[in-house]
Image: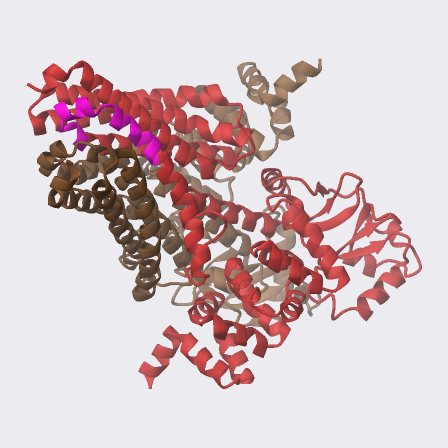
Chain colours: A brown, B red
Amino acid sequence: MTTVKETRDEQPWREIEEEIEGANVAALEETLELLTASDTARAISRLSAHDQQRLLQLLSPEEAAAVLEDIPDAQAADMIGQLPTNAAAAIMVELPSDHAVDVLAEMVPATSEAILRELPAEEQAEARELLSYDENTAGGIMIKEYLVYEQGLLVVDVLRDLEEHAPAYVDFNVQYSYIVDGDGRLTGVLRLRDLVLAQRQTTIASVMIENPTSVRTDAGLAELHDFFEDHAFIGLPVVDDQGLLHGVILRTAVLQAESRVADETYLVSTGIVGGEELRSMGFLRRSGRRLSWLTINILLNVVAASVIAVYQDTLSAVIVLAVFLPIISDMSGCSGNQAVAVSIRELSLGVIRPRDFVRVFWKEGIMGVTNGLVLGLLLGIVAWVWQGNLALGLVVGGALAANTLVAVLLGGALPLVLRGLNQDPALASGPILTTVTDMCGFLLVLNLAAAYVAQLTV
Amino acid sequence: MTTVKETRDEQPWREIEEEIEGANVAALEETLELLTASDTARAISRLSAHDQQRLLQLLSPEEAAAVLEDIPDAQAADMIGQLPTNAAAAIMVELPSDHAVDVLAEMVPATSEAILRELPAEEQAEARELLSYDENTAGGIMIKEYLVYEQGLLVVDVLRDLEEHAPAYVDFNVQYSYIVDGDGRLTGVLRLRDLVLAQRQTTIASVMIENPTSVRTDAGLAELHDFFEDHAFIGLPVVDDQGLLHGVILRTAVLQAESRVADETYLVSTGIVGGEELRSMGFLRRSGRRLSWLTINILLNVVAASVIAVYQDTLSAVIVLAVFLPIISDMSGCSGNQAVAVSIRELSLGVIRPRDFVRVFWKEGIMGVTNGLVLGLLLGIVAWVWQGNLALGLVVGGALAANTLVAVLLGGALPLVLRGLNQDPALASGPILTTVTDMCGFLLVLNLAAAYVAQLTV
């Protein structure tokens, strides 16, 4: 029996499939309950699209939302986007507002718009507001689940509200509530302990903490990181430029956003663009996104390689150069991408800014000369020894040395320029870098070879 | 005067340099106090190595530690590693244990060992223990700053301890203390409110929560992520396999570790290996690390390109093929790296495991055939139209199509194999992938060309 159990644990989707087949809701809930978050994600990704839909429809909206909270946003969007919009909306309402918006943001606009229209007015307005902010700002990652009271209320009013709405507030942090004036401007923060210990007939304005610290909706992740680094708060109210309270941002939300940005940097730099790709997502969408990146690259590659076509005579005379062209292309790309990565990392840590151009150029210049000499020497010796021609060694080694310098200067500078232009450095640096360094490298090798063609053909 | 102020804000290191020069400690503390964490990091990175040392020595150990908390670990390690070991140790003691260990881990072993030996016995033992765990396990990211009491103590004893040691406990979470038996085994968790409301002469064992949830020191990040995803705790006690209490792990520490892993994945995949690189670090260390990666790559490149040397006769006959070799090499690398990135992402989300080989192969197989056909057609048409030779289009297009399939199958599978062998997929996948796809791509083009050399030379 152990084997059977192990098989089940290893492939929990088999059990889930059977339970969906038999519409056995109680068993299904029990099976899901026993799975960890990542086991749930793995199991769901193994179900057919049809079973995924059936699963969400068999479960209550609350249970369905609990499943969606365990799986990646992109997969949740894929699953819920297949449901009838009213069923989808019923589940969305059960998700925390920040999570619901993350899922909506992963959908194609037509689908998310259709679901939004089915949401109750208040949830719809909240979701639309959250979607209107950049996802890398306080507005984009704040939550809407917090307590807010008008400052004119009495302590007894607030206590009664807490009692009456206890079930609705179960997921809220009740230790702090946020106090606003008649226009919705943030005026204070009220601690539960101060409320409980206060005279019941005084106003909450008299027991709240006045002039609380807050951040603006458009505060970026770097600013939020700094703030939580410098203060021990776990959450902060978020206001607009009129001081109106719009949400609360948690320390954990900033950490999660930083993790997401780091993941995106990696994915985008490798050509996974337009959002996360999971192999459980629809094939056409996945293939289309990968191709959109690849076709741009193939065109850039053709442009770069057209340089070689111009020098076909030189190449005919020294055919062995064809061996070294891909090496110089690839190695320059490697050196340049290291410099890109260091610049992106330094930008995200805040130790450089887009205008710190001279410093990066200087640092990478020394690096380019040094590493260029080492790599050029290495490749030059390989070429010399292998082909028994010193001139060949000097040509390919010299070209690689010079092109390494070009690559690291360009690689170091590109992220600063792109960030300065408000473009994503991880997305565009790679293709621009390799196109330029390919062309430059080919030109260097083939021009040097043309100049010394007599020595090369000894 | 506004301009001067703006200049200062933009380049706060100028002011800091003056204050170091004048040994003006009070002004220095004030200047640093006004900077945000990332402004501090940026300013420190602009100081000369000499000024960085003077700064740490002018400040009290507490103030120096506060500065180090604001800057990246790699830079902190660089700065503190330059100090006399007793001065370094005095500052390390002031850092939270988990942070101190992160900084020590960034140093060369001789330096960290010298500093460790200068630490007081208790701090030294703590740091050595934390350093002994893998940084991606509970042991590697837990904290040592928590309250622990033996279960036989009376409520009054604990209250007296809290009162007596209040200054030492100021950074601890006093809401929870951890209760152990005489051997140090975790037996309970004591909430402050239960302590305060308890009879003073009862034992804490009678008011603690028994059998508390805990994790083992070797629990990985995925397991910890799942745990905090499934439970609302902010912290958890960490025990070894004998149940002995070793530390406390915070939800925020798990989030930070995930962010660090994502950053490392990006850096390592671009060839920044052996730890973080900041341009403020020593040049030889930075250059050496970059070169260690580049020299391996240049050798792999030479191996791959040696395939071309074997086919020099074919290449001489159809010289235009030299234009397409770098394109096929680069494009196959792009397609393969997309598959690598998706596999690494799915592994880190837990939706695939190293043994889910067949699924990845199947999914990437369909992708490879589709994208291969599209890219092959595109490049084939370009070659045909450009050079006016249909056979050339068929050869380069066919080779790219076939090699795209090879690249995505290999790219999808490599991270699973490497993870299964406990190797870092981000580190090794790229070089292995590009070497194999380069060789395979060159072989495909040149063999096809050799077979159809008559049609190609029309």
- Pinpoint residue A284: horizontal percent, then vertical percent: 31, 26
The residue under the point 75% across, 42% down is: B240
The residue under the point 33% across, 38% down is: A271
As drawn, A389 above or below B6: above
The residue under the point 44% across, 47% down is: A262
- Pinpoint residue B109: horizontal percent, then vertical percent: 61, 54
Can residue B35 be seen here? The reply is yes
Which of B352 and A65 lies nearest the eye of the viewer?
A: B352
- Pinpoint residue B290: horizontal percent, then vertical percent: 41, 49
Which of A401 and B267 lies nearest the eye of the viewer?
A: A401
Secondary structure mainly formed by the magenta segment: helix
As drawn, A345 above or below A434: below
In the picture, the quarter occupied by the C terminus of chain A is top left
Q: Is residue B107 magenta?
A: no
As drawn, B281 above or below B227: below
Magenta part of the chain: B301-323
Which of B321 and B52 lies nearest the eye of the viewer?
A: B321
- Pinpoint residue B74: horizontal percent, then vertical percent: 51, 58
Picture quarter containing residue A309? Answer: top left
- Which residue of the protein is positioned furthest toward the right in this rendering? B201
In the picture, the quarter occupied by the N terminus of chain A is top right
Number of residue marks:
0
